[in-house]
Image (cartoon, grey):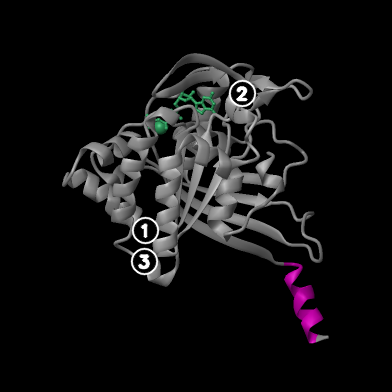
């Protein structure tokens, strides 16, 4: 009976999970678009488990302004500057509330509180090309605070697999200097721009897609996980999403496509609905997968 009482008391509670996150990835991999689209959360799907995404600090409000003033106007975001000092990198704080109707036995709202730094892609190329650079060292030091790493890869840059594996190798070595007081770090490998048809058709099999498109990166991450006990998981996402239901097409107007990836703007901003943005965040915060979040 007391157990029941205890459970009943819990029904009024909101569960909080949190994560300190760093977003890393090559120039143009879609880091800022990912963050801005998540903060703005345009045309929310009523069936999505996400109830609300609320900006907690001024920086997060700036992200929303970028989504409205740039992406929603059909324009391209500027590349993010690599700030001279890592202290100047913006730390976006967001609170994501999930609806309770997916809980079976008790009403349980879940709140994901994240603080997330979006580094410039130059950080990632510095990892590959520079050694012993003091600014790079500061950035790496800053990453050690993170409980979760969002590693974004433009899904159309598979030809750069070995470069990414090389950068990742250096990153993981630096990461292993700290052990988070015995807790294990999580790395979410997120393939972006998955509204592109060759990625879209495999969006439900992110691990297989990563193995096929980025075999060296995948191997590095698996080895890291096995040797350090850190956790790795794979995700597919699009900050722009699709248009139409029966014969869906990318809601993206391609500007260029080469070895370095795809640049685009949103084709129809009024019907802009990203997919898969919160699923990796949920996993970074809880260590669990949420089937419904993968859809929208
Ligand atoms: N098709 C498509 N293009 C995208 C998506 N997300 C971002 N882009 C495009 O990819 C390019 C780079 O996006 P950004 O978000 O600026 O990339 P970034 O990783 O922040 O780049 P840096 O700040 O230079 O490191 C731009 O042309 C975006 O419009 C997406 O989901 N789909
Ligand atoms: Mg950026």
Q: Which residue is mark 2?
A: 197
User: Is 12 rendered above or below residue 172?
Assistant: below
Q: Which residue is mark 1?
A: 145
Label 3 residue SS: loop
**Which quadrant of the figure contains the N terminus?**
bottom right
Q: Earlier in the sequence, mark 2 or mark 3?
A: 3
User: Residue 156 or 243: which is nearer the viewer?
Assistant: 156
Instruction: Give the residue displayed 64% in from the left and 25% down from the top.
Output: 272
Q: Nearer the viewer, residue 294 or 39?
A: 294
Question: Decide: marks 2, 3 in contact (CB < 8 A)?
Answer: no
Residue reaching furthest to the bottom: 2
Q: Secondary structure at mark 2?
A: helix
| Quadrant in the rendering for residue 90 | top left
- At which x and y percent is residue 110? 66, 58
Residue that mark 3 sits on: 179
| Image quadrant where residue 225 sits | bottom left
Observer able to see residue 120: no
Q: Which residues are magenta?
A: 2-12
């Amino acid at each position: 009976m007391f157990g029941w009482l205890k459970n009943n008391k819990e029904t009024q509670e909101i569960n909080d999970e949190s994560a300190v996150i760093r977003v890393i990835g090559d120039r143009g991999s879609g880091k800022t678009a990912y963050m801005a689209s998540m903060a703005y959360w345009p045309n929310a799907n009523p069936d999505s488990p996400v109830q609300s995404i609320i900006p907690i600090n001024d920086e997060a409000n700036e992200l929303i302004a970028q989504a409205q003033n740039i992406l929603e106007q059909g324009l391209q975001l500027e590349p993010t500057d690599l700030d001279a000092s890592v202290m100047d990198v913006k730390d976006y704080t967001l609170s994501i509330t999930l609806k309770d109707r997916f809980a079976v036995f008790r009403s349980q709202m879940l709140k994901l509180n994240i603080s997330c730094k979006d580094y410039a892609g130059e950080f990632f190329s510095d990892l590959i090309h520079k050694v012993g650079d003091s600014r790079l060292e500061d950035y790496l030091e800053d990453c050690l605070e993170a409980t979760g790493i969002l590693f974004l890869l433009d899904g159309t840059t598979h030809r750069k697999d070995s470069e990414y594996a090389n950068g990742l190798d250096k990153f993981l070595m630096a990461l292993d200097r700290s052990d988070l007081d015995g807790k294990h770090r999580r790395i979410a490998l997120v393939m972006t721009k998955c509204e592109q048809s060759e990625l879209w058709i495999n969006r439900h099999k992110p691990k297989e897609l990563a193995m096929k498109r980025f075999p060296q990166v995948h191997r590095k991450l698996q080895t890291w996980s096995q040797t350090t006990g850190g956790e790795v998981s794979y995700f597919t996402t699009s900050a722009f999403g699709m248009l139409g239901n029966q014969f869906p097409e990318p809601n993206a107007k391609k500007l260029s496509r080469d070895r370095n990836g795809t640049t685009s703007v949103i084709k129809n901003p009024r019907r802009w609905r990203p997919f898969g943005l919160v699923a990796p965040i949920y996993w970074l915060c809880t260590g669990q997968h949420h089937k419904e979040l993968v859809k929208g």
